[in-house]
Amino acid sequence: MGYPTPQNASRVTKIEYSPKAIPENYGYWAPDLEILKNQILGGDSESFRLAFRLLRTSDGGLLEDLTAILSHTIRPRPELFLREVLELGGGFGRAGRHSHDARTRVCRPSERRIGVKRELGSGLAGLLPK
């Protein structure tokens, strides 16, 4: 987060700080997420992917903050949002991504998720540049 560039965003896998860079017992510094949010709203795909990577391994407040940042791109940048979410495997968080059938002990994508992905995929043809 110290040098917010698309090249640096592509290399980040988790939020880490130097000792004493943020208050003790803080996992992250919320103002740093504002920088990330501004980059995403500016159309930076690498920053969107960074937030998505961080989201998948986060919980608590960070999960909430990252979900809000990513979902706030839907209205101002729908093409960026749809393109990146589909490319990155779709779905926020962990809930609802798969269904589990206790009788057969098989875990598979839910029918709802498959239908949404199919609809988004066909709808993107007219939205995204070729």
Image (cartoon, helix red, strand yellow):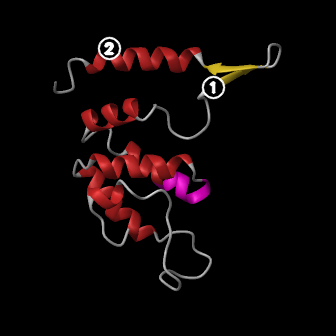
Circle number at residue 4: none
What are the residue bounds of the magenta stretch? Answer: 59-65
The image shows residue 117, relative to residue 26, as above or below, that is above
In which quadrant will I find the N terminus?
bottom left
Mark 1 = which residue? 98
The residue under the point 35% across, 73% down is 2
Say whether residue 70 is visible.
yes
Across and down, in percent, residue 74 comes to: 32, 38
Question: Dominant secondary structure of the magenta stretch?
Answer: helix
Query: Is 60 included in the stretch rendered in magenta?
Result: yes
The residue under the point 59% across, 82% down is 24
- Between 6 and 26, the one nearer to me in the picture: 6
Position of residue 58 in the picture relative to residue 34 (left or right): right
The residue under the point 31% across, 70% down is 3
Query: Is 81 included in the stretch rendered in magenta?
Result: no
Say whether residue 67 is visible.
no
Q: Secondary structure at mark 2?
A: helix
Across and down, in percent, residue 39 comes to: 27, 56
Residue type at mark 2 is Ser
The image shows residue 67, relative to residue 123, as above or below, that is below
